[in-house]
Amino acid sequence: MKKILLLFAGVFVGTSLFAQQTYPVNGTYDIRQGLYAFTNANIVVSTRKTISNGTLLIKGQTIQAAGNGISVPKGYVVIDLKGKFIYPSLIDAFTSYGLPEPTRTGTAGRQSIFTSTKKGAYGWNEAIRPETQASALFSADSRKAAELRKLGFGSVNVINRDGIARGTSVAVTLSDEKENGSILNARSAANYSFNKGTSQNDYPTSLMGAIALLRQTYYDAQWYGKQKEEYNISLEEFNKQQDIPQIFEADGWQNILRVDKIGKEFGRQFIIKSNGDEYQRVAAVKATGAGLIIPVNFIKAYDVEDTIETRDISLAQMKAWELAPGNPGILEKAGIRFSITTHGLENTSDFWPAMEQAINKGLTKKQALIALTEIPAAMLGIADKTGTLETGKLANFIITSDSLFKKENVIEENWVQGKRFILINKDAEKDTSRLVLKKTEPLKNEPAGPLIYPFTAFGNNVPLKQESVLLKNATVWTNEKEGILQNADVLIENGKIKSVGKNLNPGNAKVIDATGKHITPGMIDEHSHIVMTGGINEGAQSSSAEVRVGDIINSEDVNIYRQLAGGVTTSQILHGSANPVGGQSQLIKLRWGKLPEELKFEGADGFIKFALGENVKQSNFGTGARFPVTRMGVEQTFVDQFTRAKAYKAERAKKGSNVRRDLELDAIAEILDNKRFITCHSYVQSEINMLMKVADSLGFKINTLTHILEGYKVADKMKARGINASTFSDWWAYKMEVAEAIPYNGKIMHNIGITTAFNSDDAEMARRLNQEAGKAILYGGVPEEDALKFVTLNPAKMLHIDSRVGSLKAGKDADVVIWSDHPLSIYAKAEKTFVDGIAYWDMERDGQIRAAQKLERARLIQKMKESKGRGAKTQKPKPEARREFHCETVEDYSLELNDLERSHNHE
């Protein structure tokens, strides 16, 4: 009878307690406060305070008291919880609970959408939608709420995961009553991502475009706050949201660093929802100072029974499976503040087994609790209401059979705002709803393999270090007035070339006998598209001068290692050729294992990609394409850009000017000021002449014409203007506008006196730049030393870095290659490639790495088999998607950006 009365009381309170103050009542009006006393319980008030054999009093929605020796007031229903535990209900800071799934209208065959078609005084791009309020879209979902309550959650943050600037989220309880009574914070955070979502705008089509759009929005918002010229709902709301928490969804540790870079530019500290791979670069992640929201959707073991399919699994995928469960514990040890989310789990039932995995791999139970209660409460501005069981806070708590993180524990009840939800049938002998933690994944004490830098094939167990080295008794190609030296030495110290000559004193340097070998400067690739992630083109507009390749450098790209094996040490990473004015390029050194920012060539001048020809006028794009669609339009684009930039510069220079900062025109203005330099994709004589005339008339210079396969026709004009040429050795006839290319092009331009280089524009060709240089001898008989300069000193000159690289001279960077044979020979192999005095490529070490990683793969395969044998879930092998780019690549990264459930493995 007592049980029946208690259940009746719970139901009654649930139907009356939450009646809305402003809602009319259809029938009798009887509001009574639920009065409950939970006695003899282990009450975990917070991670700092636990009360043994205590009493918890609640009245209605609120905690009245928690402690020992508390007398139960008259009228309270007493519930004896002897031996049981009471914990604060858990909080998830990143969900889409209660929101409809974003849907995007199909784009096939539609006309180009340049600016937003949304009605009203909103911003121009639909991916920027800060006016969106999740509180206005939220509708309680009883089924989903029940699933989350069963896990122990009482509150969640609801985010509309649609767009780059996504608007405000709302923190709600998981009650089953009207939305009005469940909202805890209607503006819990402003939300962002690099994902354009359902926006119909063409722009952006790339990751670098998404970053540029967000940066421009920040600058626009700053300008908007100081002007009275226009009213813009989007910018108005954007500014209003800057004083609340800022949550950024950023999959992958490299995106965490990209987010942090934006934050530092605009004085913002983001809370970052990550994808759980922070363990790969935990020091770099910690340096951001960001709080994290981390998932526990750990990678399932791969089914490795089929040996052929198993070959498709990369080493990085295997190691991520093994190491990812240790991520929470690693973050804890590093002192990084984080909360834990259920986001990304295939099934909510996977949550507690995943938590057990994390605890087995080093996460302490104390930290697990704080990451599920106090930290998310603080992040969302609801710590005054939830997260602990202190007096005055909401009665959001769970009742458990044992300590929360014991595998035998069962969550029996979940009270939300003082309303009771019974989660298990206590009388059933076998209850499928009992959340018993399973041991199906790697066991607690199983050793894990080491981290590797970078986290991909051929990564090193420890970061490589600089050393002093004497390379002795080689044929040394200096590219200086000394020419080719026989039986000579090169001394490397502190990342620089100390001296070049004969019989050098090694001092304390390691000596490498290079007898019979050749030593050259590192190869320099003037035109490359490696290490770019998220697309190489931002082609939705005729000019994308605002985008920066430097924002999307992927330091884990295996092409770095492969090209080091071909003697390459420096590359200019270029935007593609989808539009007349492309993005800002990035010069990098191939420092294998370093962070993205550490790859960048320090102090180098800025460059930008321009383009001519079929690609920019969109010969194959069909109808509905953006301007320009003719070669006349291409010319007008250049004229317009520089005319606008001149006016922009003049207005910005006026005292007291409040001219809106335009990142696109900033880049063009830098060209006019000789602070940024043009590399232009070019083929046909007529267009090359056009661009040179436009440059003459508007007062800017062309630094380099790249491809320039009809350069032999305009070499005299290029020479007169001091334009460099970066061409292919022998590409021709792969499309109409290269029909008149000849293999003697490089030779002719070189003979005219133009600084001439051979480039790759191709990840595979870059591995053989030395052989490309050798073709200059085959086609036209270019002297050997001059031919080598086509891929060393000459590109260094056109990139303005010849004071540091491109030749072997005391004081220059120690970017040096040891070749097994004549460096222009097809038989030559790069045995060692030094960058800044670090041997990032070593043929002997490479053999050791391959052998060790073969054993590592075998160990991981066996471990996955054992995991499957213990009953762990598995997945079919999924080959990593890798795309190689060159100038002719036409891709739309927006397809990837709009996949709202992107893979969380790694970039």
Image: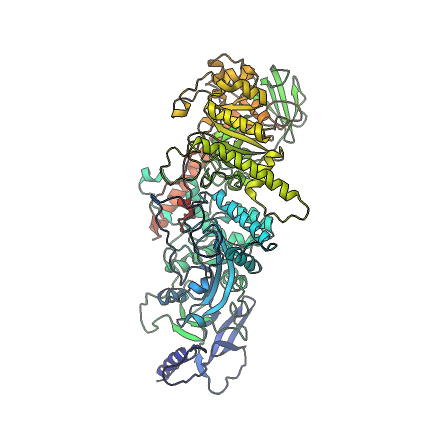
Residue lying at 52% horizontally and 13% vertically, measured from the top left = 782
**Of 616 and 826, which appears nearest the observer?**
616
Residue lying at 47% horizontally and 63% vertically, measured from the top left = 170
Looking at the image, can residue 516 be seen? no
Q: Is residue 783 left or right of 888 when viewed as pictured?
A: right
Image coords of residue 732 (percent x, y): 41, 21
Image coords of residue 165 (percent x, y): 49, 53
The way the protein has been coloured in the rendering is rainbow
Residue 721 to residue 22: above or below = above
**Of 440 and 237, which appears nearest the observer?**
237
Image coords of residue 525 (percent x, y): 52, 27
Q: Residue furthest bottom?
A: 74
**Of 507 and 525, which appears nearest the observer?**
525
How many numbered marks, from 0 up? 0
Q: Is residue 699 left or right of 826 when viewed as pictured?
A: right
Q: Quadrant of the N terminus?
A: bottom left
Residue 494 to residue 476: above or below = below
Q: Residue furthest top?
A: 781
Q: Is residue 280 left or right of 660 when viewed as pictured?
A: left
Q: Quadrant of the C terminus?
A: top left
Residue 785 to residue 429: above or below = above
Image coords of residue 130 (percent x, y): 49, 56
